[in-house]
Amino acid sequence: MLRFSQVDVFTDELTKGNALAVVHDAEGLSTEEMAAFANWTNLAETTFLLPPRDPAADYRVRIFTTSRELAFAAPPLLRTGPVENLPALAAGLAIPPDEIVEARWADNGPGWVAVLLRSADAVLALRPDYTRFGEFTGIGVVGPHEDGGDAAFEVRAFVDEDGRFGEDPVTGSLNASIAQWLIPAEIARRQYVAAQGTVLGRRGRVHLSQADGQIWVGGDTVVGITGKVALQPVR
């Protein structure tokens, strides 16, 4: 039996962020066992805490969706550059192409395309047509807030997880890749807060910053469930 927690990330109030599973002391579990458990939880992300390999670290983390392992934090982009087929991208978002200010590949593992719209209100108004996503497996959309509130940008994440389409409440990997675009392009400040999950009744707040050339992703976390899970690592 291993210690288990289910936490709500990127929020300061339980049920308002994104649910994430944490398996503690997971050394000895195989990759296959981790993947199978992550699939079983049916959560957007399941993490496993392991002993560090870097002497400067306190622990090591492996993170899985229901179908694959993800790189942790803000890894280098695997694909960058402008999106050439804007009409197809606009069709997936069910908007005219001229509503897109700019679109770039922002793939740090899950295949993200990042789309900049003129305003947060335009982002919140989106009703995507998943049947027209075509080549796009993950579309992240961002637009600036102009009301002087606690968030500088509104973000939404539309995903295709092995044929299961939907909207992710709050997404660390997407916000990381968006920041890797917006901060160097001086569209965003070197430190800002993004809101996500508003349409879904959530209140996610993701804190992005750039320091020493690195993008850092952070936010509040609330513990919702603690207990034990019947996984048997091989010691």
Image (spheres, rainbow, N blue to C red):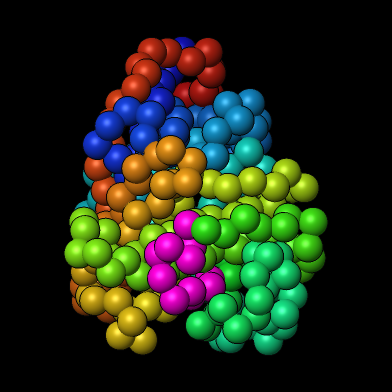
In the rendered image of this protein, does residue 150 appear above or below residue 119?
above
Look at the image and say whether residue 116 sits in the magenta stretch. yes
Residue 50 visible here: no
Say which residue appears at 52% left-offset and 58% top-offset.
125
Per the rendered image, the range of residues in magenta is 114-124
Say which residue appears at 34% left-offset and 22% top-offset.
224
Please identify the quarter of the rendering in which residue 56 is found. Answer: bottom left
Which of the two residues, 209 or 103, is positioned nearer the viewer here?
A: 103
Say which residue appears at 56% left-offset and 79% top-offset.
100
Say which residue appears at 58% left-offset and 42% top-offset.
65
The answer to whether residue 219 is left or right of residue 201 is left
Residue 171 visible here: yes
Give x and y (percent) for residue 83. 63, 82
The answer to whether residue 80 is left or right of residue 225 is right
Which of the two residues, 56 or 226, is positioned nearer the viewer here?
A: 226
The answer to whether residue 68 is left or right of residue 131 is left
Number of numbered discs visible in the structure rendering: 0
The answer to whether residue 146 is left or right of residue 161 is left
Give x and y (percent) for residue 139. 60, 63
Please identify the quarter of the rendering in which residue 58 is found. Answer: top left
In the rendered image of this protein, does residue 30 appear above or below residue 155?
above
Which of the two residues, 178 or 130, is positioned nearer the viewer here?
A: 130
